[in-house]
Each structure stands twice: as C-alpha cells, then as structure tokens.
Amino acid sequence: MRLNPTPPDQLCDAAGGDLDRAITEAGTKDGGFSPPTLAWVLDQLPVESLAASSGLDPAPLLRVRASLVKRLLSGG
C-alpha cells in the first residue's frame, strides 16, 4: 500500500520546501550543522532494510540519497 504517489525525488517540492535554501540556512539555526555532516548521516542510513520493512522498492530511495549526498558534498 502506497499512501503518497509523489516520487521520492520530488518530496521536497511537493511539501513546498526549498531544499537548497534550507541547507544554506540550517547553519544559522544549528551551529553544529554542516553539509558534509548531513551527507555522512544520510550515507549511513540503512535504506535497503528500511525500505524492505516498509514494503518499498529501495532503488528510487537510493538514487535520491546518492543525488542528495553528491549535492551536499559539492557545495550545491
């Protein structure tokens, strides 16, 4: 059962958020935040097992994570 038909890579847009702005402003709200740290945390998430336990295909989630990690590490 899938509750939200929005593809994972469009979730931020669907929620009305601006991911780039949120990442840029995060450091002003939390002095310990850094894009490389967030990239590391995301890279450590066990996406495959989380997806399996929810009955989801991990492939699109892995693609979104890889894309986001790449953006965070490249500075934009």
Image (cartoon, grey):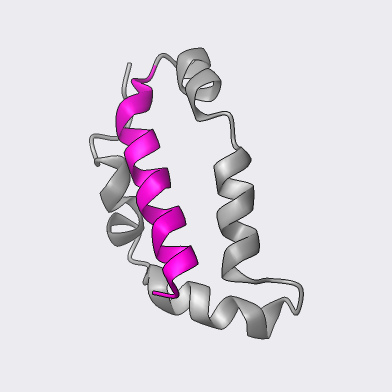
Image side of residue 62 versus residue 14, left or right: right
Front-lying residue, 6 or 26:
26
Tell me: residue 34, above or below residue 15: below
The quadrant of the image that shows the C terminus is bottom left
> Is 3 situated left or right of 40 in this image?
left
| Residue 3 position in % (x across, y down) | 33, 28
Give the vertical position of 37 relative to 61 (above or below). below
Residue 58, percent from left and from top: 38, 25
Extreme-bottom residue of the structure: 28
Left or right of residue 53: residue 19: left
x, y (%) of residue 43? 56, 44
Q: Residue at x 46, y 55 (%)?
A: 69
Q: Residue 61's image quarter?
A: top left
Q: Which residues are magenta?
A: 56-76
State the quadrant of the N terminus: top left
State the residue at coordinates (42%, 45%): 65
Residue at the image point whose x is 64% and y is 80% from the top: 27
Please identify the dominant SS of the magenta region.
helix
Q: Residue furthest front?
A: 74
Image coordinates for residue 74, horizontal then vertical, percent? 42, 69
- Let me know if residue 36 is in the magenta part: no
> At x 28% / y 56%, what residue is drawn?
14
Q: Is residue 62 above or below residue 71?
A: above
- Give the vertical position of 14 relative to 57 (above or below): below
Residue 71: in magenta span? yes
Number of numbered callouts drawn: 0
Please identify the residue farthest to the right as the structure is shown.
Answer: 32
